């Protein structure tokens, strides 16, 4: 049988990884796909750059449009990243009747509704396993493995760079900027690393996970997003003393007929397996009503882990090239006419537990004032820790863990606590989730 002809847009870390994996495992991949998957053309901005891949056996071009319009190419692999020109190229590939495989989470999260609708009309597939959690097959798992479940919540460490930074801060006391520079050197970070440290990359991935878990449209703008830039080693150490780890978590949860979508640093009990997912590794917890809580772990970035997901998508696409488009697995797990827009809960209406750190003057009545404010707003304290003042200092750190409460009550409490003359601004607040089966 003829080989399936592939064109790759972008020969960076992941593009080279994909070519290498396809070459190394050619025989086994062919046995699985039923046809050889052959890269015939690839595009790159700089044709002369040295790359960790054997160039040859395919044409290297500088104009990506040459690939998306090439009649011999059946599947286009988009590895350029970012919104444009990726969006225009993918739409052009679809218009030319090509299937698309992409690792581009930003593109799918922000322009996915438009892209899938174009693909649907044209009867082609757009596959995006590599867009979320790198090598972990989480899209396939939720979309195909859990179709019998009503999915209740998904919570994941889906940005390797921020997990790497938090891990190094905790284990080695390293400086934020220094660890970020290392993540950039290792090729984990986004082209613009603020996407990693401000939670945007995780929010892109959460948008995709929520859509396939709940059958809702992709709605990136609705995700509450907070990065890790305000996390200090002080809080990492206090959290540890209280039996918690701080992780950058992406959470999508059904609450009655509404959905929570949030990305923020989160204290997690250290006994949870996910609290021990360190370095650049990713992990995603999925709770389905039938299957119960499940956990998926693996490399969330890097050349070959991401290539593993891309090649799996390529094999899937090649296997279904001859099937009727209406019989294929739907892009977003639910049939396109069954996607329902559930309201997204504003952050003020979200309930979670909290870690608070205040700096208080060391004199009688201060703690009583603070606990009165919390009590008045219905906030119940789970644990409290007061440290001795450092030598020569009159201010003591107080750490409070609370039970679950509406975010708006906590906002009001923090405002009142910060107004107390005996408390220094600013009160540190980090959300806390127990991640137990029933989310209690
Ligand atoms: N910058 C991303 C991360 C790459 O650190 O997880 C993988 O999507």
Image: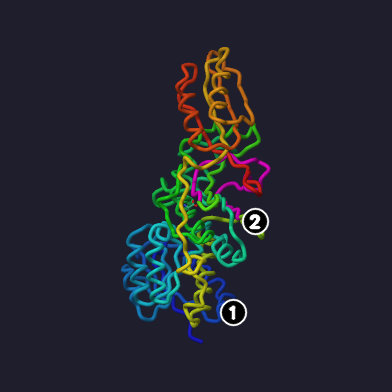
Q: Quadrant of residue 137?
A: bottom right
Residue sitting at the far right: 271
Q: Residue at x 59, y 32 (%)?
A: 402
Task: Identify the element where label 1 is drawn.
Answer: helix
237 or 17: nearer the eye? 237
Magenta residues (range): 259-286
| One can see residue 198 in this view | yes
Residue 279 magenta-highlighted = yes
Q: Which residue is mark 2?
A: 294
Q: Mostly what secondary structure, the magenta segment?
A: strand
x, y percentage for residue 418? 46, 24
Task: Identify the element where label 2 is drawn.
Answer: strand
Residue 7 magenta-highlighted = no
x, y percentage for residue 372? 56, 22
Q: Quadrant of the C terminus?
A: top right
The circle on residue 381 is none
Looking at the image, tell me whether mark 2 or mark 1 is earlier in sequence order: 1
Q: Residue at x 36, y 80 (%)?
A: 71
User: Looking at the picture, does residue 330 appear above or below residue 164?
Assistant: below
The circle on residue 31 is 1
Q: Is mark 1 within 8 Å of ligand 1?
A: no
Local packing at callout 1 (Cα closer than 10 Å; few below 14, some 14-19, many 20+) is few
User: Looking at the picture, does residue 9 appear above or below residue 297?
Assistant: below
x, y percentage for residue 255? 55, 49
x, y percentage for residue 437? 66, 49
Report whether 99 appears left or right of 171.
left
| One can see residue 57 in this view | no
Report whether 236 appears left or right of 338.
right
Label pair 2/1, CB-CB below 8 angstroms: no
User: Looking at the picture, does residue 160 appear above or below residue 1?
Assistant: above
CA gap between label 2 and label 1 equals 31 Å
């Amino acid at each position: 049988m003829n080989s399936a002809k592939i064109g790759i847009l972008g020969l960076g870390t992941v593009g080279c990884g994909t070519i290498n994996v396809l070459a190394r495992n050619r025989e086994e991949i062919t046995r699985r796909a039923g046809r050889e998957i052959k890269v015939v053309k690839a595009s790159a901005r700089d044709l002369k750059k040295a790359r960790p891949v054997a160039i040859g056996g395919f044409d290297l071009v500088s104009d990506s449009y040459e690939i998306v319009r090439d009649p011999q190419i059946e599947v286009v692999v988009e590895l350029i990243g970012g919104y444009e020109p990726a969006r225009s190229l993918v739409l052009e590939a679809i218009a030319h009747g090509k299937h698309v495989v992409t690792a581009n989470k930003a593109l799918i999260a922000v322009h996915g509704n438009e892209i899938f609708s174009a693909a649907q009309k044209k009867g082609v597939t757009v596959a995006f396993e590599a867009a979320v959690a790198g090598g972990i097959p989480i899209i396939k798992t939720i979309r195909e493995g859990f179709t019998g479940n009503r999915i209740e919540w998904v919570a994941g460490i889906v940005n390797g760079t921020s997990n790497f930074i938090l891990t190094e801060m905790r284990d080695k006391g390293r400086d934020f900027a220094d660890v970020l520079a290392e993540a950039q050197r290792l090729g984990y970070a986004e082209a613009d690393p603020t996407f990693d440290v401000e939670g945007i990359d995780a929010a892109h991935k959460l948008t995709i996970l929520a859509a396939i878990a709940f059958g809702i449209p992709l709605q990136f703008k609705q995700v509450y997003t907070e990065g890790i830039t305000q996390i200090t080693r002080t809080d990492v150490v206090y959290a540890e003393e209280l039996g918690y780890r701080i992780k950058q978590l992406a959470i999508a949860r059904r609450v009655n007929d509404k959905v929570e979508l949030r990305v923020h640093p989160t204290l997690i009990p250290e006994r949870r397996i996910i609290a021990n997912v360190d370095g650049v590794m990713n992990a995603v917890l999925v709770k389905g009503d039938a299957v119960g809580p499940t956990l998926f772990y693996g490399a969330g970035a890097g050349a070959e882990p991401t290539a593993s997901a891309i090649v799996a998508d390529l094999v899937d696409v090649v296997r279904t090239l001859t099937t009727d488009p209406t019989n294929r697995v739907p892009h977003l797990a639910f049939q396109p006419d069954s996607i329902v827009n559930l309201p997204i809960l504003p952050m003020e209406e979200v309930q979670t537990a909290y870690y608070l750190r205040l700096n208080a003057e060391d004199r009688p009545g201060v703690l009583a004032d603070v606990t009165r404010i919390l009590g008045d707003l219905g906030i119940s304290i789970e644990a409290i820790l007061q440290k001795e003042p450092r030598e020569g200092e009159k201010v003591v750190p107080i750490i409070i863990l609370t039970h679950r409460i509406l975010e708006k009550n906590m906002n009001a409490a923090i405002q009142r606590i910060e107004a107390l003359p005996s408390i220094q601004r600013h009160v540190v607040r980090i959300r806390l989730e127990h991640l137990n089966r029933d989310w209690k």
